[in-house]
């Protein structure tokens, strides 16, 4: 349903008497043609300025397709079927209930715009298959999704979150090619056969105080990717104080860079169902985890999948994961299981109960270990004692892995300083990544990218 912003400006009675019937009809017709999203009855005559989809500062994204951005949006309380724009001047905008961007529609959000989620209805924004979001902020004028409550009263779980659904491939038991996304009471599908599918662009975006828990294994994360394709651009996105995972990928091929997960209730970064994108510059930090088993990485594949080419297999470079340093629920730096085949390079893992947990269940038929190279694991213990043999061999088989103190000045806290005092030389990333990041961790003295108004601790 796309509402009409059709209330014309009021004219005096004297002026109206002087208009001909034909002119009055023409004005009414023109006014009712102003189509917007939602079902608001407020007049808007300002067209969105939008653009053609800004190119990413990352070398891994291809950007969103251009096109008309439509008129200014109305109330966000139902399906968006026509392209429209959320303006910074018109905000803060309120998401009421589940708002979907439908196939063929583009939701453009101007830099500096604030969008809030309604607590009573668990406001959630869903970009459906074929729909797009064009949210391009800047370092000092970010786009912020947050709670509707006043500052000082906000908490994780105040609203739903942001969900992107696409038509890229996924891997499921039984060979299914599509599924319904978790966390919603409606059946919203994701999956397909287009690895270059585009869900739009997210750049310099912060998502905070989100997360809805409908039941065990059925939650809305800060930012959820369901079969999102490599035609989508994702960089400089922070998820902060969310009830469940910071970022979660269900299959898909989307690439992403410069991601921050701060105080996720559960895992910082979670991937499953054959996700195979490229990820670079990931920073995860947790001071007060909510669940009993928070992990920096939790990455899975499918136990009964005999085809290793369709397992979860991202290529990940330059990561810093900071645990709560011996506090309650310190969890694991990386939990990799169920035939996960990813490659992880230049990672720095600090402050967890155990740095690495590579798990093979007794009923698995797909047991090839992942590859970890030029990484540092400095935690209470190096490996998970319950899976010590496979975890240790994965660490040992990698190239130049270390368990020494990386010298991070402040890995946790309200003002973290994640740049190591003395940098450790790592591997050189391949083409398609930032090849200058030949160091361990997400940061170096010359490249501290977590600065600007888009970052808030």
Image (tube, helix red, strand yellow):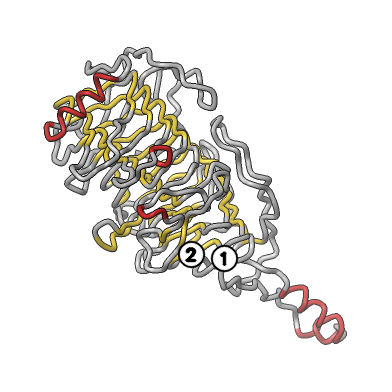
Instruction: State which quarter of the image contains the N terminus.
Output: bottom right
Q: CA distance from mark 1 to mark 2?
A: 7 Å
Question: Which dot marks residue 126?
Answer: none
- Tell me where residue 30 appears, x and y as whole percent: 77, 73
- Tell me where residue 341 appears, x and y as whole percent: 35, 34
Q: Residue at x 50, y 43 (%)?
A: 142
With 26 as the anchor, is 64 left or right in this view? Answer: left
Q: Quadrant of residue 23?
A: bottom right
The answer to whether mark 1 and mark 2 are in CB contact below 8 A is: yes
Q: Residue at x 70, y 64 (%)?
A: 45
Question: Reading the chain from its start, which is encountered first: label 1 or label 2?
Answer: 1
With 168 as the anchor, is 30 left or right in this view? Answer: right
- Tell me where residue 114 appears, x and y as whole percent: 49, 52
- Tell me where residue 182 appears, x and y as whole percent: 36, 59
The one nearer the camera, 425 or 178, is 178
Q: Secondary structure at mark 2?
A: strand
Q: Quadrant of residue 428?
A: top left
For label 2, the crowd category at 10 Å Cα-Cα, with few meaning under 14, some 14 to 19 and many 20 or more, is some
Instruction: State which quarter of the image contains the C terminus.
Output: top left
Reply above or below: 132 against 413.
below
Q: In this rendering, does residue 229 appear at all? A: yes
Residue on which the image places disc 1: 80
Q: In this rendering, does residue 446 appear at all? A: no
For label 1, the crowd category at 10 Å Cα-Cα, with few meaning under 14, some 14 to 19 and many 20 or more, is many
Q: Residue at x 56, y 63 (%)?
A: 102
Q: How many marks?
A: 2
With 254 as the anchor, is 56 left or right in this view? Answer: right
Q: Residue at x 70, y 52 (%)?
A: 67
Residue on which the image places disc 2: 99
Q: Secondary structure at mark 1?
A: loop
């Amino acid at each position: 349903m796309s509402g009409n912003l059709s209330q014309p400006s009021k004219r005096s009675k004297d002026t109206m008497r002087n208009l001909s019937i034909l002119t009055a009809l023409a004005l009414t017709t023109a006014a009712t043609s102003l189509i917007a999203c939602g079902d608001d009855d407020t007049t808007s005559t300002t067209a969105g300025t939008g653009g053609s989809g800004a190119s990413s500062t990352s070398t891994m994204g291809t950007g969103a397709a251009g096109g008309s951005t439509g008129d200014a949006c109305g109330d966000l309380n139902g399906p968006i079927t026509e392209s429209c724009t959320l303006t910074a001047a018109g905000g803060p905008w309120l998401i009421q209930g589940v708002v979907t961007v439908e196939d063929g529609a583009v939701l453009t959000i101007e830099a500096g715009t604030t969008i809030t989620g309604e607590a009573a209805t668990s406001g959630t924004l869903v970009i459906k298959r074929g729909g797009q979001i064009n949210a391009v902020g800047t370092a000092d004028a970010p786009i912020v999704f947050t709670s509707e409550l006043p500052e000082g009263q906000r908490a994780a779980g105040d609203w739903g979150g942001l969900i992107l659904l696409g038509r890229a491939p996924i891997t499921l038991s039984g060979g299914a090619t599509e599924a319904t996304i978790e966390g919603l009471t409606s059946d919203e599908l994701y999956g397909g056969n287009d690895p270059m599918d585009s869900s739009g662009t997210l750049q310099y975006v912060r998502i905070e105080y989100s997360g809805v828990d409908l039941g065990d294994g059925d939650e809305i994360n800060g930012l959820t990717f369901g079969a999102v394709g490599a035609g989508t651009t994702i960089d400089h996105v922070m998820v902060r104080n969310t009830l469940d995972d910071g970022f979660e990928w269900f299959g898909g091929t989307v690439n992403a860079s410069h991601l921050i997960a701060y105080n996720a209730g559960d895992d910082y970064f979670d991937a499953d169902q054959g996700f195979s994108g490229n990820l670079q510059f990931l920073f995860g930090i947790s001071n007060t985890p909510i669940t009993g088993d928070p992990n920096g990485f939790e990455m899975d594949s499918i136990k009964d999948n005999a085809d290793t080419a369709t397992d979860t297999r991202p290529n990940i470079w330059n990561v810093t994961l900071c645990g709560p340093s011996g506090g309650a629920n310190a969890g694991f730096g990386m939990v990799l299981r169920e035939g996960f085949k990813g490659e992880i390079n230049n990672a720095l893992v600090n402050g967890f109960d155990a740095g690495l947990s590579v798990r093979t269940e007794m009923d698995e038929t797909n047991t090839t270990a992942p590859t970890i190279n030029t990484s540092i694991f400095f935690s209470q213990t190096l490996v998970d004692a319950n899976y010590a043999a496979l975890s240790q061999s994965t660490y040992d088989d990698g190239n130049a892995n270390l368990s020494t103190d990386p010298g991070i000045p402040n890995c946790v806290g309200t003002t973290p300083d994640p740049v190591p005092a003395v940098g450790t030389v790592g591997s050189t990333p391949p083409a398609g990544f930032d090849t200058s990041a030949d160091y361990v961790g997400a940061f170096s003295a010359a490249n501290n990218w977590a600065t600007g108004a888009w970052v808030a601790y």
